[in-house]
Image (spheres, rainbow, N blue to C red):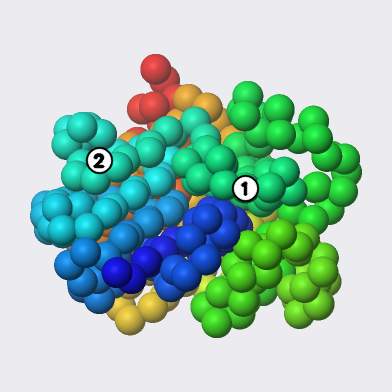
Amino acid sequence: MAVWVFTHSDGDGVCAGALALAANPDARVFFTHPYGLLGDLEAVRAGDKVIICDIAFSEDSLLAILERFSAISRDGELIYIDHHPLPEGLAVKDIPGRIVHDTGSSASELTYIVFREGFSDRMSRIAIYGAIADYLDDTPVISQLLCNWDKRTIYLETGILVQGLEGRKREHDFKREVIVHLASGQPPSMHKRLLESALENTRREEEAIQMIGGYLHVYDGIAYVLDFPFSLGKTAIYARALAGAIVGLAGERRKGFIDMSLRTCRRDIDLNRILRQITPKLGGSGGGHPTAAGARVPEENFKPFIEELNKAIKREGMH
């Protein structure tokens, strides 16, 4: 029987993956995403154990994924751990396997809870790192775990982890190395290459902050930046802040599509719901969290997308 860990490659996903690996030392770790999960699961064989962390369901392939989950859990074991909102009409009870789902907690916290009985006390740091990385560190569980550590050191270590990973976006071998490092119980600062990457990316971020204004476009309540050579998520944050807009958006052209990250600080705006509603009509897809989400639309539909997004955030803001 093989053990597989499929996880996201951001801070929360890396920490969740590290916790899953610590509890299953012989596991193979792979990075995936909502649109790649179905294809990646083809490598799983009958009788295998599969742990999936921090991967939302793609509505485009939902039925096929649920069928694959059913086959895996029937012949082996499947644990699905996630905190993204489920597609409309899908309930936890409808998902085959062992399902651990809570939109109010990070994937790292949920993974820690699943495997905590086999952990030493110092492994709780990994759950805290992941929670901070996804802005979900004010939950009862994480608050209690944080009482056992110096908050200042924990936040420093999380900053090193997040900044170091940000500079290595698609370097999966490097990120897998970080997962192994964290699973061994060592903090991010003890990984030399991660620390060097964090320092370099922090320097680049300061430069980016000074330059984003030159790429900034504003359409009513939306501030957007296209093809800016920096992290999409961070660029979206700074675009919104610089323009004082409701939503910040950063996108990059790729193979005829525009891939985007969107951010808002408004709690009355649900980006996940809005994107799931408007992107399919424009030949794309989207979703995520209420205040932090992603989308993908054909390049020729980007302007209509901005227009529809603006209408939607105005409607939501009036309720």
Q: CA distance from mark 1 to mark 2?
A: 33 Å
Residue that mark 1 sits on: 119
Residue that mark 2 sits on: 87
- Tag on residue 167? none
Closest to the camera, between mark 1 and mark 2, is 1
Residue type marked 1: Phe
Query: Which element type, helix, strand or loop, lies under badge 2?
Result: loop
Vertical placement of 39 versus 310: above or below? below
Which residue appears at 79% of the width and 56% of the height?
157
Which residue appears at 28% of the width and 53% of the height?
78
Which residue appears at 75% of the width and 63% of the height?
186
Q: Quadrant of the N terminus?
A: bottom left
Residue 59 visible in rendering: yes
Residue 192: % across, % down = 81, 77
Which residue appears at 34% of the width and 48% of the height?
80
**Occupied quadrant, residue 213:** bottom right
**Occupied quadrant, residue 202:** bottom right
Tell whether 220 sits left or right of 141.
left
Residue 208 visible in rendering: no
